[in-house]
Image (cartoon, rainbow, N blue to C red):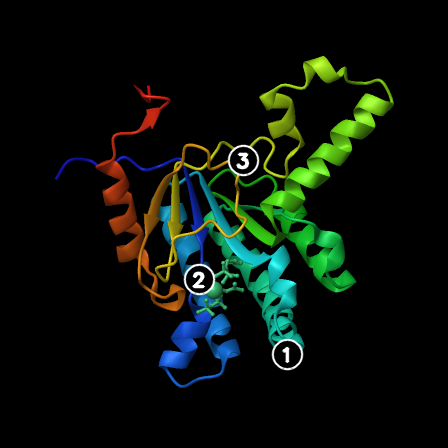
Amino acid sequence: MEQLKIPEHVAIILDGNGRWAKAHNLPRKMGHAEGCKTVERTVEDAARLRIKYLTVYGFSTENWKRSEEEVGALMQLFRYYMKRLLKIAKVNNVRVKMIGERSRFAPDIVEGINCLEEETKENTGLTFVIAVNYGSRDEIRRAVQRIAAEVADGTIDPQSITEEVIANHLDTAGIPDPDLLIRTSGEIRLSNYLLWQCAYTEIYITDIYWPDFNKEELVKAIENYNKRDRRFGGRNQK
Ligand code: IPE
Ligand code: IPE
Ligand code: MG
């Protein structure tokens, strides 16, 4: 078989934890717990496949609207898995970065996120980006606020606001745009994920529920990506 071309940046919308739980007659939170294990395994798989950036959508700005019980369960899982992630990141030379607005979380969670970023910042392998309390529109809103403040204080002239300036004010500043976006559980929508960054991303949808996602599925998505004729505005990508 020809050598697989590994995409530099893979973004994932993990979906289907609830449906997985229902299919197994379990409470939704058990689906989320299984989903967290899949995130852990996927970080290791991505690191071994030499993917440079993996961005996973863990909790959206809209997910706060779920029941108090479900949001509470997700926060507890987050607390637990952040600690495990620190160990996994150390063993696998993974740098962790969070995108989204972290101040809405409880102080101990914010501290955990800051610590994860700080303690892994020198790692040179995979960059694992976790999107929590993330919504693309909110990210763009915050970027616009910062740019407007710079215009107001005279550090930037409105005529010099290029696409690059906008990209540099997003949470993903410094991270290349995703090459491949995977969504599990069959839904064919972006759900407010990386709207700016996915302008030319190849999209792969699988019916598999997130807790059942594994390395084989990841490789299948990459194989499918390898068959794509990537184009930007009608020209093949260099
Ligand atoms: C994804 O699974 C996890 C989060 C969005 C936090 P869901 O909880 O959305 O699972 P379904 O879509 O109800 O099956
Ligand atoms: C997308 O899943 C958000 C995350 C994976 C965190 P949702 O289940 O919240 O999305 P919708 O509601 O089906 O669009
Ligand atoms: Mg869902």
Task: State which tag comes first along the sequence, 1 or 2.
Answer: 2
For residue 178, which quarter of the picture?
top left
The residue carrying mark 2 has its beta carbon less than 8 Å from ligand 3? yes
Q: Residue furthest right?
A: 153
Amino acid residing under circle 1: Glu
Q: Position of residue 227 (x, y in %)?
A: 21, 37
Alpha carbon distance from label 3 to label 2 = 21 Å
Q: Nearer the viewer, residue 9 or 3?
A: 9
Q: What residue is disc 3 on?
A: 196
Q: What residue is disc 1 on?
A: 69
Judge the density around disc 2: few (<14), some (14-19), many (≥20) Cα neighbours within 10 Å.
many
Q: Which mark is residue 15?
A: 2
Q: Residue at x 54, y 49 (%)?
A: 192
Q: Residue at x 44, y 84 (%)?
A: 26
Q: Residue at x 41, y 47 (%)?
A: 47
Alpha carbon distance from label 1 to label 3 = 32 Å
